[in-house]
Amino acid sequence: MQAINLADKLASFSELYQPRTVGQFNGHDLMVVKLHGPFVWHKHDDTDDFFLVLKGRITIRMRDGDVTLGPGELFVVPRGVEHCPVAEEEAHVLLIEPTNTPNTGDPETAAERRLI
């Protein structure tokens, strides 16, 4: 067992909107991801969506209003709520989701699960 350095994990890849699983917790993946620009509008019918900004700023667009987050801030999108994360400049984010949750809400279009 050893500590996980999130900055080192984030430095190991450059792809955007391609989460990397860095650990697991009670059936959930702990993931880091780089964001820049808009993602796709999507929702998760069966799970909430956890975002913790590590670096930069993101806006989580929702049909009922936006939430903007900076470093050290987190937001949980409730299950079933359509949303679209957007980052004007590159941002680094920690995500926590049940293992095998598709990042687009649809297994057909989701990023492949990658462990680092």
Image (spheres, grey):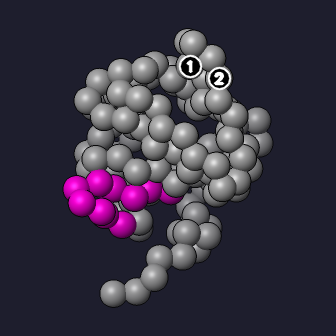
* In the rendered image, the vertical position of residue 99 relative to residue 26, given as above or below: above
Element carrying mark 1: strand
Q: What secondary structure is the stretch in magenta mostly built from?
A: strand
Question: Residue 25, position in %: x, y?
Answer: 30, 63
Q: Do the numbered discs 2 and 1 sit on residues whose CB atoms are within 8 Å?
A: yes
Per the image, the residue denoted by label 1 is 62
Per the image, the residue denoted by label 2 is 66
Q: Would residue 67 appear left or right of 49 to someone viewing this image?
A: right
Q: Quadrant of residue 81?
A: top left
Q: Quadrant of residue 35?
A: top right
Viewport quadrant of the N terminus: bottom left
Question: Residue 85, position in %: x, y?
Answer: 58, 31
Element carrying mark 2: loop
Q: Would residue 73 appear left or right of 25 to someone viewing this image?
A: right
Specify start and end residues of the magenta stretch as a single range.
Answer: 23-32
In the image, what residue type sits under mark 2?
Asp
Viewport quadrant of the C terminus: bottom left
- Which residue is at the front of the view, 81 or 13? 81
